[in-house]
Amino acid sequence: MKEPLIRMTNIVKRFPGVVANDRVNLEVYRGEIHAILGENGSGKSTLMSILAGLYKPTEGTMEVSGVERKFRSPRDAIACGIGMVHQHFKLVEPFTVAENLMLGQRRGGMLVEQGKVAAEIRELADRYGLAVDPDACIWQLSVGEKQRVEILRLLYQGSRVLILDEPTAVLTPQETSELFQNLRRMADDGCAILFITHKLNEVESLSDRVTVLRSGKVVGTQVRASLDRKALVNMMVGKELQVQPVRKSTRIGEVVLELKAASALNDMGRKGLDELSLSIRSGEIYGLAGVAGNGQRDLAEVIAGLRPMTGGDYLLDGESANGLPPRTLIEKGVSYVPEDRLGMGLVPDLNAVENLMLKDYKKAEFGGRWLLDYQKLSDWATGLVQEYDVKLSSLLQPVKLMSGGNLQKLLLAREITRQPKLMVVLYPVRGLDIGAIEAVHRLLIGLRESGAAILLVSEELEEIVKLSDRVGVLFGGKIVGEFPADALDLEQIGLLMAGADVQAGGEDSALSR
Amino acid sequence: MLFRVEKRMTTPPSLMVLVPVAAACAAMVFCALFLLLTDRSPVAVYGAMFEGALGSEYGFSETIVKAIPLVLCGLGISVAFRMQVWNIGAEGQFYMGAFAATWVALNFPSLPAVVMLPFMMAMGVLAGALWGVLAAWLRNRFSVSELISTLMMNYIAILWVSYLVYGPWRDPKGLNFPLTAPFPEAAILPSVGDSRVHAGLLLALVVALLLQFVFRKSRWGYEIRVIGSSPSAARYAGLDIQGNALLVMCVSGALCGLAGMVEVSGIVGKLQAGISPGYGYTAIIVAWLARLHPIAIVLVSFLFAIIQVGGFMVQTLGVPAAVATMIQGAILFFVIGADIVTQYRIYRVSGDGSEVND
Amino acid sequence: MKKWFKVSLAALAAAALLITGCGGEKKKAEKPAETGKTKVAFVYVGPVGDGGWSYAHDQGRKYLMEKMPDVETTIVESVPEGADSERVITQLASQGNKIIFTTSFGYMDPTINVAKKFPNVVFMHCSGFKTAPNVGNYFGRMYEARYLSGIVAGKQTQSNVIGYVAAHPIPEVIRGINAFTMGVRSVNPNAKVKVLWTNTWYDPAKEKQAAITLLDGGADVIAQHQDTTGPQQAAQERGKFSIGYNTDMAPMAPKAVLTSAVFNWGPYYVKVVDSVKKGTFKPESYWGSMKDEVIGLAPFGPMVADDTKKLVEEAKKKIIDGQLFVFSGPIKDQSGQVRIQAGQKMSDAEMLKFDWFVEGVDGTIAK
């Protein structure tokens, strides 16, 4: 254990306008499982991508077994025995497992001996308990099996350092525990495992050491023997936030949205919402904290009518809204600002006028039964663009040419001008610059002041703390904790977000359910 | 020196026009080289081509005749394609339109023209529309790709017409040859002078203008534009995607059916097998090259008609049909290939990967 | 951007030069045509290289050129039978052709239409039935050769199943199948002729596939009525026999082709062109027979037994002499009912609209 297998020294990675990694040092030893912990945007993935040869570091050096290396591509990293399993698998669906493993292999001549390869794969699979049939086609496999194929591929390529990017995000609990056993076996066999996560329980149950990143910097490394979850959460989230909460709402009214034990399936057919209950009042911003992928989008789509519920009740102003189509919900005053602005909220190839009119084009003032009065629409759109300070070179340009901030302002202009009763906003400031973030926040507060109920979904605690009148924590498709704005406990929120079973700890007075 | 290719965010309108024109010219230069290699004068060959298609009043009128079904089918296809509903069943809808129009002409021979022609038109439109809607229904109900269903339904329609003309609809006076009886005079579309340019031209132009108006000014045009550009945004905004798929295929099929009616009534004067030498398929390329723009479809159809009409005239110089087809193919290949210039930006990069210039 | 503009402009200019340039050239090129040569044009439905129908007509054209050096011919091949054919015929007429042979059934009405506008041009339409003051039609009594080839097939078959790949259920094809079957049954009353419709004239792959289906169904000799040699190739590949049609198909499948029922258009084309030049042309419906040498049988393949050859030669002689008429009674249809009484002969009119199969044919005609 003296000589580290990997040593990264003073790694700096700059992207235009962002420092993703700032003088990071990391050592990885043979036979250890090393967790990389941090919130979204803390630089974990960038760091691992550098190690896997996907990115070139701006500064700093990397040593593998004491020899300095510069990777120009993932191929170089693989040649040094370093491989990465990405969150989105890179497998060829119609091919068999064996064929996928052979792809990109340069050993041997033009001909490959399928039988020999299959035998090698079986042997590897047996050794580490990665049960996969080499002759099965990828599309026939479950997500867990696909992940095993990805791991097998790395082993087959001779990798001794395996990097896994949030490996459990797509797995069932059963599959997760199997994965952990297999990873342990590989580590015992002398491999080094690096895995990215933001779940505390995984860190506790699997890793030998954990390195915590925040804002691109290493804030600390702990070894298993002296693991302290509170200390970890503080490292992750930061002791104090640099935000001044805005003035809280003074006019909280009736309950607008109420979900009772709502359940729904996610895109993969698994439980996305698990008997989630939630209520939001008019004039209130409800901030929903949580790590992405815990059911945020499923919740928003249920409220917007885009995703069917498999159980529970959805009430709007006290009336059942179960199974109503999107159009009806829009007419009832439900507004949804999706995270994917250009993929869902706006039509990229159409211009600003055509995007602004998306939900209003049937209004009588914009034409008769059949036709549209583009002159009127254009005047109306000009007004909106000015009112909401959207900067664009021409109303007639496709909106895909606009910057992220202006896109979001355009989207909010369309939604807010309809005076919604309820708005669900997902990650409204993701990818925006400071000026735009401020503008978006002002718009949301303005909407709250006008009496709307707002469900703000964010992964940035700063934003939640700043805007919310009430904060809930979403984990595993459930609200696992709720806090009024004046009794926020960041440490608790951080623990809940990371999946710690706080109630079992028994000391949680802040939980007000 | 390296080159890098990048998708363009927008295409300057000037490029959209200039590039295809330049590509067509490049194709002709390319074919000229080939013709020279085979000891033929490219000047004479191209001369015959344009002379045949445009050089005389007759050739010009025939080019228009050839363009009419292409325009109608192309317009029909554009309606569906605008919503990203891939109707490649124009050929089948054309045949169904021809079939239904013939049914009227054969079964009600004594109707006066003022009743007969609108009746034939209505039935042709209806048959084409039903044939299209069927594919849309399959798509909505069973998620059957309309790409496959419309293609397969082409064969059904073509063989159905074959069955009729070889079987029950044979002209009793036709010595059992595979032709229906000639249509009564009232079932023939009026034509201009003694040329074969028939009233279908008027219909095609009216439909083109109408669609141009609908696409630009109507609520429905806006809806299919939204659905076609981004189905997820359309769903998000609560637009009726399935209902519009039905409607779009209905209109698309109706126009192709109208093309079939116009062809039997205006040109052939009876139903026979092989009434379409692939209009429905050529129209797909027409619609695509015209970027689904109604007015451009009229122009591109005319260009295609020139190429095809001219192609036969080239043969009279002793050029085999295969060479004439090659010239047509080369022009298509170049024009479609040149799309990369309008869709993508190609620029040079220096060794270290930074951009050199546009 | 600017660069593109310049390039496009240059290309446009070049194209304009090409087009205008060729206009001038064209006028010069037309002059030699006025040297007194008679211009004759042919319109083909398939490509000349189809090895079948259009090829046979083109062989006739070549024969014509050889015999009459003062004739200049133009061909247009692969002309669809829809709207295109009328235009092609019109343009050929206006290019100064004096005689135009339109060689597919679907050209009949277009030919008649164009003929009205060009009273000084003679039109000859093959395989139809309409005539006009300047339009004649012509065809061959292929049934005679079909009958003879049927004798060859009937003698050769071991399985007593003979496959027949047929294009479309029209009288011409039905007549051929019936004559062939009667030839087969004249020497082998137990044999059956199995018919498979392809619904196409020119689709080599499909026709080949149809022949393979028949071979797999037990047939050991394949006859055909198509424009291509696809069925012959199938027979050759499967090591079975076949009867060619249109032209001598032995070169395409030497191991399979027993003989071919062929057209020999050359002499007739010479006759027509000669009559037009002499001014003696009269529109007629010409149905050339074996006696006229418009119809014939290609040389036998080496696998045909000598006694078969003898049988065929005898029958051929009788047909030419008029002693043997193929469709003379008694003829039973598929249901066993006598359709043509003993002692009766079918008239041309009856033969021209044949719509039923004789006994021994295994197949159906869509009604």
Image: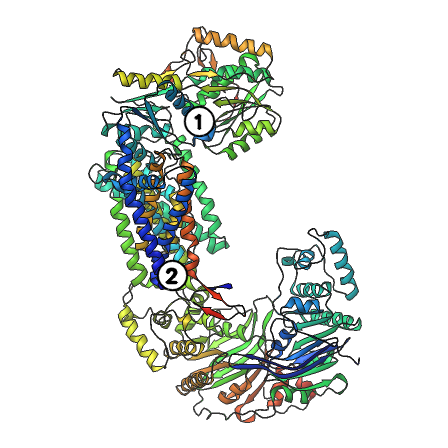
In this rendering, the answer to whether A344 lies above or below C270 is: below
Up/down of A382 relative to B109, above or below: below
On the image, the x and y values in percent for residue C172 come to 42, 23
Report which residue position mark 1 lands on. C55
**Callout 1: residue from which chain?**
C
Tell me what residue is drawn at x 38 percent, y 76 percent: A414
Mark 2 Cα-neighbour bin, 10 Å: few <14, some 14–19, many ≥20: many
Residue A276 is situated, as x and y percent measured from the top left of the image, at 57, 77
Measuring from the top left, give residue A197's x and y in whole percent. 65, 77
B283 sits to left or right of A305:
left
Q: Is mark 2 on a helix, strand or loop?
A: helix
Disc 2: host chain: B
- Image quarter of the C terminus of chain C: top left
**Residue A164: x, y in percent?**
67, 72
Q: What residue type is labelled 2?
A: Ile
Q: Which residue lies furthest to the left in this view?
A: B193
Q: Is residue C282 visible?
A: no
Quick check: can you spot residue A420? Answer: yes
Which mark's residue is nearer the viewer, 2 or 1?
Answer: 1
Pick the front one: A464 or C207: C207
Q: In this view, does A236 lie to the left or right of B260?
A: right
Nearer-the-camera pick, A318 or A116: A116
Residue under label 2, please give it: B224
Q: How far apart are marks 2 and 1 (CA)?
A: 51 Å
Residue B330 or A155: which is nearer the viewer?
A: B330
For the point 48% across and 18% down, the residue is: C146
Q: Choose between B95 and B358: the one closer to the eye.
A: B358
